[in-house]
Amino acid sequence: MRAFLALNLNEEIKNKYSNILRINEKTAELKKVSKDKMHITLVFFDNIKEEQIELIKKEVINSSPTPFNINFENISYFTNKFKDINVIFVKAVSEELENYVKTLRKKLDNIENLKYDRKDFKSHLTLARLKRVYNNQKLKENIEEIEFTPSYFLANSITLYKSDFVNYTEIFTVNF
């Protein structure tokens, strides 16, 4: 099954960022992340087996940090190989989070035959994925014009979600 470990966000952060995007439909078509699905992905598993779930849970529990702050600094975007914007996000900054993800991945490496995405971790809160971009330059300008107020929140729980392309199903949550 496809699955991912994610840092849970509090309602205040979800409310603050769920409707911040104001992109003209003539500039781009967006698929916004719904408020109830907002999270920070830590590790994405391509294909895990049922029997690996308990092992993942054990490693998450064994590597749980004390709660730590995450700062949300600005809105930015990722681009595809053609330099078109494909994801709009809020940049999340935390040295503790960076260290935790490194520790967590080392622990997960102990699980036999566990496959996960090993790309460099880029801490962010996805706001929208782009379906179609009509004017990439105008879209960049729209993003830069968004009024953004930096904020922070206390990270204190992680959830493993089963992931299909339509919905997420919670498998377990670890509070720390």
Image (cartoon, grey):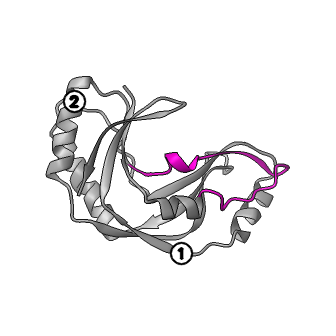
Placement of the C terminus among the 4 image quadrants? bottom left
* Callout count: 2
Label 2 is placed on what type of residue? Gln
> From the viewer's perspective, is residue 134 above or below residue 92?
above
Residue 113 in view, yes or no: no
Placement of the N terminus among the 4 image quadrants? top left
Residue furthest to the right: 26
Left or right: residue 108 versus residue 68 is: left
| Label 1 – label 2 distance at C-alpha | 38 Å
Nearer the observer, 34 or 82 = 34
Residue position marked by numbered label 2 in the rendering: 52
Q: Residue at x 66, y 62 (%)?
A: 20
Q: Which residues are magenta?
A: 18-41
39 drawn magenta:
yes
User: Crowding at label 2, few (<14), some or many (≥20) Cα neighbours within 10 Å?
Assistant: some
Left or right: residue 173 versus residue 119 is: left
Left or right: residue 75 versus residue 152 is: right
Point out the tag, 1 or 2, that comes first from the N-terminus: 2
In the image, residue 15 lies at what x, y percent?
A: 56, 60
Q: Secondary structure at mark 1?
A: loop
Residue position marked by numbered label 1 in the rendering: 150
Left or right: residue 21 versus residue 9 is: right
Q: Residue at x 61, y 45 (%)?
A: 81
> From the viewer's perspective, is residue 44 above or below residue 11?
above
Nearer the observer, 120 or 53 = 53
